[in-house]
Image (tube, grey):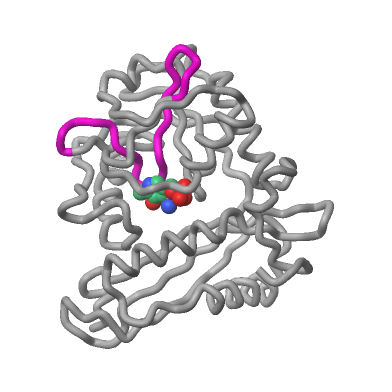
Amino acid sequence: MLTPAFKYGACTFEGLRGYQDAALKEVHVFRLREHLDRLRFSMHVMRFDDPPPDEAMRRALRELIRANRIAGDCHIRLMVWVDGDGEQTATGPIGWGMAALPRDADPRVREGIHVAVSSWTRIGDNAMPPRIKVTANYNNGRLSGLQAKTDGYGGVILLTASGHVSETPGACVFIVREGRLITPSHTDDILESITRATVLELARDELGIAAEERPIARTELYAAEEAFLCGSGNEIQPILSVDRLKLGDGQPGPVTRRVQQVYFDAVRGALPARRGWLTPMLGGAAP
Ligand code: PMP
């Protein structure tokens, strides 16, 4: 209990997904390299001594999935923390571990969710940088999530200290206006989300939908024709209303459905040009 990971939240992590490829009898982890790169960046900013090598984590992940006989869709959590019983500025010794749990399709992906704008403010880059995935950051999301849950919402969007739309406690936000996608910039206190980058790339290259990264004001959420949130865990979830103001006709919109389709095609290996994003865990080459 005296470890800095508990005492001070000195723990970096990643949440990843594995997807079943029924035809190949395979489980593929989506964008493993990008998750390991981001984890390395989080550890770098937190000045961890002696971070575990990528190769060791890749090997352990493969062994974990095989040993647990996971053959279907799963969610993976990878954590690296400051162990021992050191003080606040301790940078080692380093402990690490991972877990993989089967995860079925989430009904919110099909049905969508109603979200609120939180009265809590998003943590800022100069205080607790959201660009790094450190467990301590997640108390900001927890407070806003608890408030939204108490108030009967399925999700919540946080605003930055200057009032721009930032992100949800565990996902990034896109809105649709005049058929174009708009998402907050990296300077609006968001995690540099791998799913956000995936959506931007697929929208542009596969769907021919223009996308913009720029500040979004709160009331622009209300003006959106459609909106959705995206993340490795949440995947692509349509937002049906914000602060009980209906978006469009209050149903998942056509642009959101197209983005969902192309995203699930990518994670399941149905886009040949994007198979490089998939790392096989079972019978394929070593990850
Ligand atoms: N924002 C936050 C705060 C998150 O925790 C996550 C989930 N890791 C995301 C956005 C989405 O990031 P990614 O697409 O890389 O999973």
Task: Report whether residue 240 is seen.
Answer: no
In which quadrant of the rendered image does the C terminus lie? bottom right
In which quadrant of the rendered image does the N terminus lie? bottom left
Characterize the magenta stretch by its predominant secondary structure. Answer: loop
Residue at 21% across, 50% down: 125
Asked if residue 173 lies in the magenta stretch, the reply is yes
Front residue of 147 and 215: 215
Task: Report whether residue 237 is seen.
Answer: yes
The location of residue 112, given as percent across then percent down, is 51, 30
Front residue of 139 and 187: 187
Looking at the image, residue 106 sits to the left or right of residue 279; the answer is left
The location of residue 270, given as percent across then percent down, is 74, 42
Q: What is the span of residues highlighted in magenta in the rendered image?
A: 161-181
The location of residue 245, given as percent across then percent down, is 35, 17
The location of residue 256, given as percent across then percent down, is 54, 26
Residue 34 lies, with reference to residue 58, above or below; the image says above
Which corner quadrant of the image does residue 221 belong to?
top left
Asked if residue 108 lies in the magenta stretch, the reply is no
Which corner quadrant of the image does residue 4 belong to?
bottom left
Residue 49 lies, with reference to residue 125, above or below; the image says below
Residue at 19% across, 40% down: 120
Residue at 31% across, 30% down: 116
Which corner quadrant of the image does residue 163 belong to?
top left
Front residue of 74 and 194: 194
* Count of picture labels: 0
